[in-house]
């Protein structure tokens, strides 16, 4: 009967779609293996090594939103997921895990399976697309404004009166970490329940990069491994933030970000006057560094972005080279011109704990909070 055949065909199509949604790209091998093998169902197939770009995105202040929204928190999370997944898929990536307030995102690089050499270094477009997708996610979510506006069109009108005013002051935002490395792709769990995902210290690094965005007060951080995969013109829009040692790592990692409008903002942070005061120099320091100060000031006052970048690079290099007096001078000039630069503000606050005197045992990198 043709009608029964149509029903069966529709059911199979729906099941296939559900498998695709449930397992994602990481589960393709599991599905293919079991469909080709007519024996017993075996979801626990061996994992494969892949090279990939890993993105870890996390909703800011999620606990606060959960307490205020209660059951409506699902609407909130799913709307953030819809924005995130849309941009990731359109850039050639794949959403992998949805972990409450966080999302693991993957852009698989060609080759690299089972230990073979990856051609990832040649895939500049994929690196560029991954970064652009994450920037669009951050932009689109931020543009939604406060939580009440964000949920306005999606049935989120049942916010309790006690929380209504607080949630209107809650601005929806997301942080992202990007890293490139290897991972084992496969089934995690048992025959009772599995998740198709990725296991690797590199996945953990992406998560720690996202956590560090709060420390550096920026929406996105990328590792040097990811940064070096970008094309030259995209690299030129990025800047180095720090060199850090993540807990559990053996080697320090260079951090980069893409400065946004707030970094070049003339809107000062609340403690701006205090930061200007603690970075000011005395007469002896001025006499010693007179030429450097004048040269840096001239570059900052110019309209040349390359000159601005040169001063910023000098600031970061002085910090990493343990010349914290020079870093202090550059930082003073910088925040007077761009008082909204959160990265430099965070650096000043960190070095002021040591009175801008580098400890003898400082290892030229910082241990992050995560």
Image (tube, grey):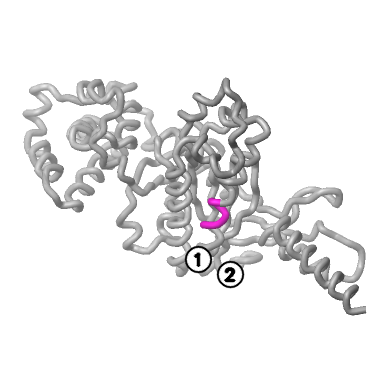
Disc 2 is placed on an element classified as loop
Q: Is residue 355 above or below residue 19?
A: above
Q: Is residue 303 left or right of residue 104?
A: left
Residue that numbered label 2 is attached to? 111
Residue 132 horizontal/vertical position (percent): 43, 57
Q: Quadrant of the N terminus?
A: bottom right
Residue 245 horizontal/vertical position (percent): 47, 38
Residue 17 placement: quadrant: bottom right
User: Is disc 1 surrounded by few (<14), some (14 to 19) or many (20+) residues within 10 Å?
Assistant: many
Residue extent of the magenta highlight: 83-87
Q: Is residue 367 above or below residue 174?
A: above
Q: Is residue 193 above or below residue 124?
A: above
Residue that numbered label 1 is attached to? 120
Between 298 and 142, the one lying in front of the other is 142
Residue 356 placement: quadrant: top left
User: Is disc 2 surrounded by few (<14), some (14 to 19) or many (20+) residues within 10 Å?
Assistant: some
* Residue 338 appearing in the image: yes
Residue at (12%, 26%) from the top-left corner? Answer: 285
């Amino acid at each position: 009967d043709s009608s029964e055949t149509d029903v069966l065909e529709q059911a199979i199509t729906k099941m296939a779609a559900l498998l695709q949604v449930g397992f994602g790209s990481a589960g393709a091998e599991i599905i293919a293996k079991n469909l080709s093998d007519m024996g017993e169902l075996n979801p626990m197939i061996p994992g494969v090594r892949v090279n990939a770009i890993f993105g870890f995105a996390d909703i800011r202040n999620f606990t606060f939103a959960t307490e205020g929204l209660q059951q409506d928190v699902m609407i909130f999370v799913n709307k953030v997921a819809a924005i995130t997944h849309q941009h990731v898929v359109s850039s050639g990536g794949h959403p992998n895990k949805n972990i409450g307030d966080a999302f693991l995102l993957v852009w698989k690089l060609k080759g690299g399976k089972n230990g073979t050499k990856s051609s990832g270094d040649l895939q500049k477009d994929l690196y560029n697309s991954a970064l652009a997708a994450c920037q669009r996610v951050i932009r689109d979510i931020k543009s939604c404004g406060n939580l009440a506006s964000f949920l306005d069109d999606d049935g989120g009108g049942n916010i309790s009166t006690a929380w209504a005013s607080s949630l209107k002051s809650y601005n929806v935002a997301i942080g992202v970490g990007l890293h490139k490395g290897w991972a084992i792709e496969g089934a995690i769990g048992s025959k009772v329940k599995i998740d198709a995902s990725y296991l690797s210290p590199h996945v953990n690094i992406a998560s720690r990069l996202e956590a560090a965005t709060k420390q550096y007060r920026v929406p996105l951080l990328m590792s040097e491994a990811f940064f070096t995969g970008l094309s030259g013109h995209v690299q030129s829009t990025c800047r180095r933030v720090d060199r850090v040692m993540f807990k559990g790592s053996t080697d320090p990692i260079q951090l980069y970000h893409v400065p946004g409008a707030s970094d070049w903002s003339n809107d000062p942070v609340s403690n701006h006057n205090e930061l200007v005061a603690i970075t000011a120099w005395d007469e002896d320091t001025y006499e010693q560094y007179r030429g450097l100060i004048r040269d840096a000031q001239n570059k900052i006052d110019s309209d040349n972005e390359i000159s601005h970048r040169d001063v910023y690079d000098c600031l970061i290099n002085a910090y990493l080279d343990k010349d914290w007096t020079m870093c202090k001078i550059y930082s003073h000039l910088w925040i007077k011109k761009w008082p909204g630069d959160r990265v430099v503000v965070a650096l000043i606050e960190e070095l002021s704990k040591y009175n801008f005197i580098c400890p003898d045992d400082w290892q030229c990198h910082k241990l992050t909070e995560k």
